[in-house]
Image (cartoon, helix red, strand yellow):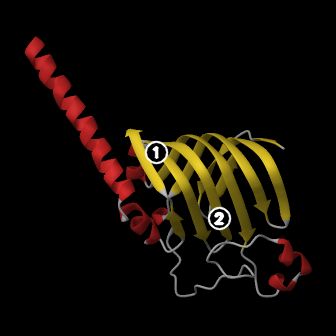
Amino acid sequence: MGSLMKRALVLLIGLILNVLLLENLFLWTPALKALVATSKVVEIDYDFAWTLVPGRVHVAGYTMSVDDRAVQMQIDAAEGVVDFDLLAFSRKEVHITRARGRGYHYRMRFVLSEEEAKAPWVELVPPIKNIPFPPLWRHPERVKRPIDKLWTVKVEDLDLELEELWVGPGRLDGQIHLQGGFELHPRQSLTLQPTRIEV
């Protein structure tokens, strides 16, 4: 029995090390960025990312932009640590169970009609990297995907230090502490968990 237990332990350690190796190769090569880019909606980039525990990713110099039919968004971070539920990916769900970080900049604006974009207040909404201004939908060639083909995003235990929070024409700068979470079902619902913002 002792020999069997040792073999099982060796196999388990080998499995964990292989998972870590695959995760880090996925992060260190262009594979992850290319996979995300296939969505045509989200683009990500980062200076460096690594993992020492399956599902926990450390990232530095991170940026993400979203060009959707409803919103355009940009998130930049100096550094962060994010825990993922790896099994959730098989359910078409991005489930972040814990997120910590500093040096975050969050910018979001709603996509407008050409008439709405003429309003004076539109000049106050944030610029978004690689997305033209004003915030119009410029991709009629993109087919609207069925709801059951869209991924759910669930974020829990969010605790971040922000330097900028810019949503529409409203902007906060300085040291901002954000705690909370949310669950997004695209084109269906957005549920906010209890959220706290300290300025």
Query: Which badge, 1 or 2, is on the more N-terminal residue?
Result: 1
The answer, for residue 189, to whether it is visible in the render is yes
Q: Position of residue 189 (x, y in %)?
A: 65, 56
**Mark 1 is on which residue type?**
Val
**Mark 2 is on which residue type?**
Gln
Q: Residue furthest right?
A: 120
Query: Which image quarter is the C terminus in?
Result: top right
Query: For residue 108, which numbered disc appears in the image?
Result: none
Query: For residue 57, which numbered disc appears in the image?
Result: 1
Q: Which residue position holds label 2?
A: 74
Q: Quadrant of residue 165?
A: bottom right
Disc 2 element: strand
Q: Position of residue 43 (x, y in %)?
A: 52, 68
**Residue in the image at 61% along x and 77% along y:** 130
Residue closer to the observer: 171 or 84:
171
**Residue in the image at 29% along x and 49% along y:** 22
